[in-house]
Every structure is written in C-alpha cells, then in structure tokens.
Amino acid sequence: EHDVRDDEIDVLGHVNNLAYLKWMQSAAVAHSSACGWTTERYLESGGGWVVRSHKIEYLNSALANDTVAVRTWIAGFKKVTSLRRYQIVRKLDQAVLAEAETNWAFIGFEHRVPRRIPQEVIEDFRRYQASVDS
C-alpha cells in the first residue's frame, strides 16, 4: 500500500507517470524479499535483475490523498527473463488505476551480461506463490 504524496501530483492534478514506475519497483523489491531474495542475497549470489522493458496502461487517475495498493506477481520465467505483472488499485473504491508489466532480465553482476536464472530463485518464487494461493 502507498499513500499518494503531494510531490507525486503533477500540473494536471493527478499522480505523475513516473510515480507509478517507482511504486512498481518498490512492489517488485518487496515481493522478491518476501520470496527470500533480498538485495543482500542477490549481491551475495553475484546476480540479479535488471529491467528490459515496462508497459503500463493507465485506466483511472490516482489523486492527492488516495491510498493505492500495488499488486504484483510473476507471470512466467524463461531462460534469462521473467515477466512480472502489476495491478494498481485505489483502496477506497477498488478502482483499477493501472495494469502493467515489466520484463526483467537476470544478469551476472561481474560482467553485467544475461545469465540463466538460478533454479533456486525460480523455486523460491514459486514456493512463495503457492503459499499465498493456498
């Protein structure tokens, strides 16, 4: 959850588009941590995620004093990429404000090149999702 701050409001009176990206990033980091993959653990493993692309569809405006919930989940894994989806909802009326996705690539930190997603990462994310679903 996030309470919209005054500095996130643009000249049109609604939340600036860049704020949505920040919310998505925060939700992705929180979700990864909940799965057992904190920033520290990624650093220790020598690999982690970088963004390849974002797609956001804005459906309704977030306004000053709104509280939003950013929902996120992993939609799938490939060899070196993972698709993460998001839904951003206004808490008051459950209006969907945006639907989004990020295509993440797993890289080795030393050479900054893509590398296969470790099976342990995939299993931890799937295990967490299974525990949430049950």
Image: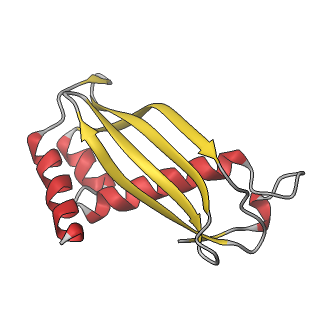
- In the rendered image, residue 97, in percent from the top left (x then y), is placed at 63, 57
Q: Nearer the viewer, residue 128 or 107?
A: 128
Q: Quick check: 107 above or below 88?
A: above
Which residue is drawn at the image coordinates 75% and 75% (left, top)? 65
The quarter of the picture where the C terminus appears is: bottom left
Extreme residue toward the right, this view = 11
**Protein image colouring:** secondary structure
Left or right: residue 39 versus residue 125 is right
Which residue is drawn at the image coordinates 79% and 66% (left, top)? 6
Q: Nearer the viewer, residue 103 or 30?
A: 103
- In the rendered image, residue 9, in percent from the top left (x then y), is placed at 80, 58
- In the rendered image, residue 99, in percent from the top left (x then y), is placed at 53, 49
Left or right: residue 40 versus residue 51 is left
Q: Nearer the viewer, residue 93 or 56?
A: 93
Which residue is drawn at the image coordinates 22% and 30% (left, top)? 78
Q: Quick check: 4 above or below 86?
A: below
